[in-house]
Image (cartoon, coloured by chain):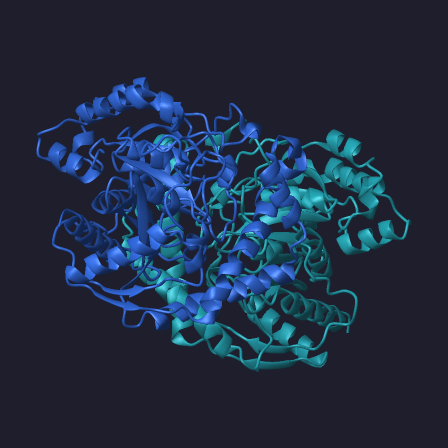
Chain colours: A blue, B cyan
């Protein structure tokens, strides 16, 4: 894979040029894109022109290529949100985060495959670790492109589990920052209280580096050894849904962290947090019925059947049910700091197991819904596997403590790597 | 003016047709639009065709014409956000609230003038109460069109004081619901933690009726006499900025409410709420620098000088300053329920005074910033004046208590009307 931070450091040191990195991407795309199908739009020629800008190498992202999930508006590339309704659509402007990537010296290389309006409905992208498996969704193309070394960095979004799950299935780092730390302006909305923009990279230090560059925040975690975190191990009431391999992976991650000096203690979620799992779906679907009102009312026949039926059912959710779900979410958010009063972060599965076989499903976001609802920073930590398929575990922090969360995730990633070598 | 609720009731009773209401609007537009300049796009022919749909009269909005501030996307009408950058822009879809208006049986008649990206920069609209005065902003056209009887209802948005202030200056009701009760999906973003969609109508019962119809919530307040509210009179530390006429108006409103049976007691804002006034500007400008990144980076010369300079300055706001401002906002939101523990609502000025003379400024949003930041429901209550110019006072409720807020505003509106007659 292309490790963004390492590439950026080598560009900074004059050992590598942005152009050479672009060529690495172009080679990987030429070799593998036909079988993986990560992109819906690519403009290598425009990138080749843009990469000649001599200012790039001195900017925070150092001219590194960035893929943009096709849920974000781009003025220079088609934007279809994975929907037939938007065939050939070319927005008038860029989404805020796309403009922020450019400001930071990132090179927009193309648009990556999203499921239809970032829903659960699969698109055709294949998992680079095993082409017979899904890469997960809805940020399918961004995760697959990074895993296949076609890109060092890519933007994604998560409304249920659309960043953490594909990162886990593809064996890369995925970072869902605190709610609205990266603006969702110009991102097609599915559910406004949940939609969260985030990032994919080869490893934890790479997404931290990119998030720091794009948001102009102190999120770099590579400049000193990460401190040993106090970890709460959370199996959740969904534990029986996780595979035996995932059970083993979570315990291996905990042991590796302990061996490296972290404290790990079991944490049981109080009832209000379990209740909040149910609130997620109510809020998501109530809002989707309104956020996608134009598409549903005017182009219903052009919406795929699974999503259409989801919105059909959503029409019956009342304002009272929605308000009750929001109150549950608020109480759950208030309960978290107390639960975590002696812990820096939570360690919990990123998904029920490895990437499912086949392309008929993008997998189950059950282990992600709660944390998206709570707006907490989440990082998929790669490094564990079941045969050739990756198994992801996630580090979850408190709202606004993105740096501490990334630092703990980096600590765990290194601990897992050492443990695997041992 | 065209009172939406009364018109809807007469349509429901079969005494009036949607077509007859549309004709009233068309007559007023023919008579006055040339001098007021409330619209940037009008399609009376399309409305005349749409009004023939026999289902309209049975739908919640009964086929009433609705104006849409040109900050909301519309697929059938140009959408320019008050900016040269978007000259001739036609979005691919409708904003969520526009689709929701159609779902409720509203007839989209045209797009109303907004200031540039809903900022403080004035557009050319005139105040129907006195053409030499500003109608306020940024929802200038929506407020002016309702005040001039060209529309019974119009959509607006508020990031600082863009609904309550123009409603006050034009002598109509303006309703800023709780944050995100009306979705802002498809509304051009200025500051995502502040932008709030809302409504204008002739009186309080009219905006309550329309909000109920559009959001499918129990917000109608006309079906029983409103209960006498417990009112906290809040002058704020900005009181010296208000005119003598506004001082008198607020006291007259308080006396009228008391005479009608309400309890009115003085409330002093604790320091954290005064501090939050300053947090508003920091959050607004930090976010605008990012929300408008594409426009600022690619079309800087096409942004008007005052807004360009505002964004120039915003570039210097750090993430730490922004985070501190958000923490202040959170503490202020948490302090409000305690402050209001024996009050249903707050009564406070909608603006420092009547509409300023001239079109060089849209007036001062100082009395609105805090409540926008807190996300509380606010209603401009019309009925008081200084000569021919209206003076608005606002009723502010607690987050999520929109119905109680509207009910208290209706109580006050009726009390003021009785008091004025007496």
| Position of residue B11 in the picture relative to residue A98 (left or right) | right
* Image-quadrant location for residue B53: top right
Please indicate, yes or no, whether residue B136 appears anywhere in the rendered image: no
Q: Position of residue A57 (x, y in %)?
A: 17, 31
| Position of residue A105 in the picture relative to residue A362 (left or right) | left
| Position of residue A69 in the picture relative to residue B152 (left or right) | left
Q: Is residue B150 above or below residue B230?
A: above
Q: Nearer the viewer, residue A361 or B123?
A: A361
Q: Is residue A374 above or below residue A293?
A: below
Quick one: quadrant of the C terminus of chain B?
bottom right
Q: Is residue B29 above or below residue A381?
A: above
Q: Nearer the viewer, residue B407 or B351?
A: B407
Query: Which residue: 56% across, 28% down?
Result: A84
Q: Position of residue B67 (x, y in %)?
A: 67, 43
| Position of residue B152 in the picture relative to residue A117 (left or right) | right
Q: Nearer the viewer, residue A95 or B4?
A: A95
Q: Position of residue B156 (x, y in %)?
A: 59, 49
Q: Position of residue A371 (x, y in %)?
A: 41, 57
Query: Which residue: 40% across, 24% down?
Result: A41
């Amino acid at each position: 894979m292309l490790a963004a931070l390492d590439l950026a450091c080598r560009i900074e040191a004059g050992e590598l040029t942005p152009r050479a990195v672009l060529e690495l991407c172009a080679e990987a795309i030429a070799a593998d894109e036909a079988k993986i199908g990560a992109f819906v739009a690519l403009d290598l020629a425009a990138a080749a022109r843009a990469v000649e800008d001599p200012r790039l190498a001195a900017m925070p992202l150092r001219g590194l290529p960035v893929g943009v999930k096709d849920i974000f508006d781009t003025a220079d590339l088609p934007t279809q949100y994975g929907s037939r309704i938007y065939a050939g659509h070319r927005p008038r402007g860029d989404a805020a985060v796309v403009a922020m990537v450019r400001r930071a010296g990132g090179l927009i290389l193309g648009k990556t495959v999203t499921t239809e309006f970032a829903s659960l409905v699969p698109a055709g992208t294949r998992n680079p670790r095993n082409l017979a498996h899904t890469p997960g969704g809805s940020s399918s193309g961004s995760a697959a492109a990074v895993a296949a070394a076609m890109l060092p960095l890519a933007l994604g979004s998560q409304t249920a589990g659309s960043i953490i799950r594909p990162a886990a299935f593809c064996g890369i780092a995925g970072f869902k920052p605190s709610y609205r730390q990266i603006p969702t302006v110009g991102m097609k909305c599915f559910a406004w209280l949940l939609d969260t923009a985030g990032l994919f990279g080869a490893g934890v230090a790479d997404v931290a580096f990119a998030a720091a560059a794009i948001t102009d925040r102190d999120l770099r975690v590579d400049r000193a050894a990460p401190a040993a975190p106090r970890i709460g191990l959370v199996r959740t009431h969904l534990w029986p849904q996780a595979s035996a391999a995932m059970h083993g992976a979570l315990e291996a991650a905990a042991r590796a962290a302990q061996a490296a000096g972290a404290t790990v203690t079991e944490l049981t979620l109080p009832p209000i947090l379990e209740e909040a799992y149910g609130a997620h779906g109510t809020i998501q679907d109530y809002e989707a019925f309104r956020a996608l009102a134009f598409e549903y009312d005017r182009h219903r026949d052009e919406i795929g059947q699974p999503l259409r039926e989801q919105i059909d059912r959503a029409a019956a959710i009342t304002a009272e049910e929605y308000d009750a779900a929001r109150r549950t979410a608020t109480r759950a958010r208030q309960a978290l700091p107390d639960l975590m009063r002696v812990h820096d972060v939570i360690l919990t599965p990123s998904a029920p197991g490895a990437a499912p076989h086949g392309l008929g499903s993008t997998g189950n976001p059950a282990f992600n819904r709660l944390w998206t609802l709570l707006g907490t920073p989440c990082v998929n930590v790669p490094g564990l596997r079941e045969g050739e398929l990756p198994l992801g575990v996630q580090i979850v922090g408190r709202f606004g403590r993105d740096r501490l969360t990334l630092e703990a995730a980096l600590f765990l990633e290194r601990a897992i790597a050492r443990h695997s070598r041992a």
